[in-house]
Amino acid sequence: MKSRVTSHRLLILGGTFEARKFSAKAQNKGYECITSLAGRTDNPLLPDGKTRIGSFGGVGGLVNYIKQKKINCLIDATHPFAQQISDNAVKAAQKTAIQVLRLEREAWQESKGDDWLHVQTLEKAIDLLPHKARVFITIGRQKLHQFLKRKDLTLFARTIEQPDFDLPGSWILIKKRPPYTLENELAFFKNNKIDILVTKNAGGSETSAKLTAARKLQKKVIMIKRLKKLEAETYHTVDDMLDRLNTL
C-alpha cells in the first residue's frame, strides 16, 4: 500500500536554482515531481526527475495539464520576475481546487554603504542613466533591446543566452552563468571602469556579489522593483516549503 507521501504528485514550475534544489529534496522524501521549464534557455540546467519544456498556452492549458497528469499540488518556483506564469498558477490552482505554494527567494535589502536608486520599470531606469555612462546591465536578455535608444552609453550586458538582435559596436556582451564570485565582480567593475549597475531585484546568493562589489567600490545601483503578483502562500527556503508540504 502506498504511503501518503509517495502518492503525492507535484508539478514544479521551475527554471531556477531553488526549483532544482527543491525537486531533488522532494524526490528524496518520496514525492513524485514533474518540473516544467518555459523553454527560453537553449541549454537549461535540468533538475532530477521528469521534465517538460515549453508553454502551457495560458491558464486553460495549465488546467488541462494538471487534470491530465492528476497533479496533487502546484509548486511555483519560477523567477521572482516571472509574473505571468505565477499569476496563471494561482488561477489554475483555483480552477482545479488544488493547493499552490510559491517558493520565492527573498528580495535583496540595502546595506550600509549601498547607493541604490529604486525604480518601478526598466524604462525609468534607462531614462535615469547619466550621459555617456559606462553601464553594467544584468537584467537578462528579453528586454535588453530597450537600451538601444541610449546611443551615448557604453554598455556591458551579462546574459546566459545570446540576445535575439544585433548588438551595437559600443556594447560588450558577457555570456556567463551564475554563480559569480566577489573577486571576479570586483575585477570586472575595475577593469571596465563601470560607473553604474542596472539590475532587477531578483534576490538570492548566486548573483549578489555584484551588489557587494558596487558597495565596496562606491558605485550607484539602479534597482528595478519586483512586479506585484497574485497572492499565494509563499516560502523563501526549500526546507520551509518541504515542511509545509508535509502538512498537506
Image: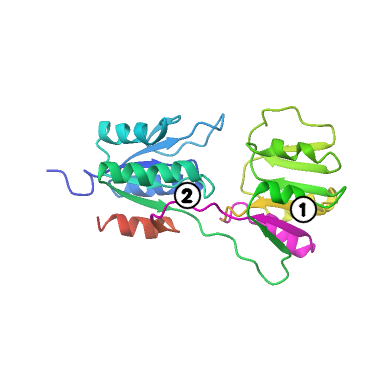
Q: Amino acid at mark 1?
A: Leu
Q: Quadrant of the C terminus?
A: bottom left
Q: Which of 28/189 is in front?
A: 189
From the viewer's perspective, is residue 195 above or below residue 65?
below
Question: Relative to 157, does residue 204 appear above or below in the rendering?
Answer: below
The percent coordinates of residue 66 (x first, y second) are 30, 36
Q: Secondary structure at mark 2?
A: helix
Percent position of residue 193, x then y:
85, 51
Q: Secondary structure at mark 1?
A: helix
User: Which image quadrant is residue 86 in?
Assistant: top left
**Residue beneath label 2, please?**
18
Residue displayed at 65% across by 38% down: 143
Q: Which residues are magenta?
A: 204-232
Residue 145 sits inside the magenta stretch: no
Identify residue type, mark 2. Glu
Say the numbered circle drawn on residue 76: none
- Residues at discs 1 and 2 in contact (Cβ within 8 Å): no
Residue nearer the viewer, 6 or 99:
99
Q: Position of residue 68 (x, y in %)?
A: 26, 31
Which residue does the image show at 74% across and 53% down from the upper left? Answer: 197
Q: Residues within 10 Å of mark 2 (few under 14, many from 20)?
A: many
12 on left or right of 68? right
Instruction: Mark yes or no: residue 175 visible.
Output: no
Q: Quadrant of the N terminus?
A: top left
Measured as percent of width and height from the top left, residue 21 is found at 44, 48
Mark 1 or mark 2: which comes first in sequence? 2
Q: Which residue is mark 1?
A: 128
Res 50 quadrant in image: top left
Q: As displayed, is residue 198 above or below residue 116? A: above
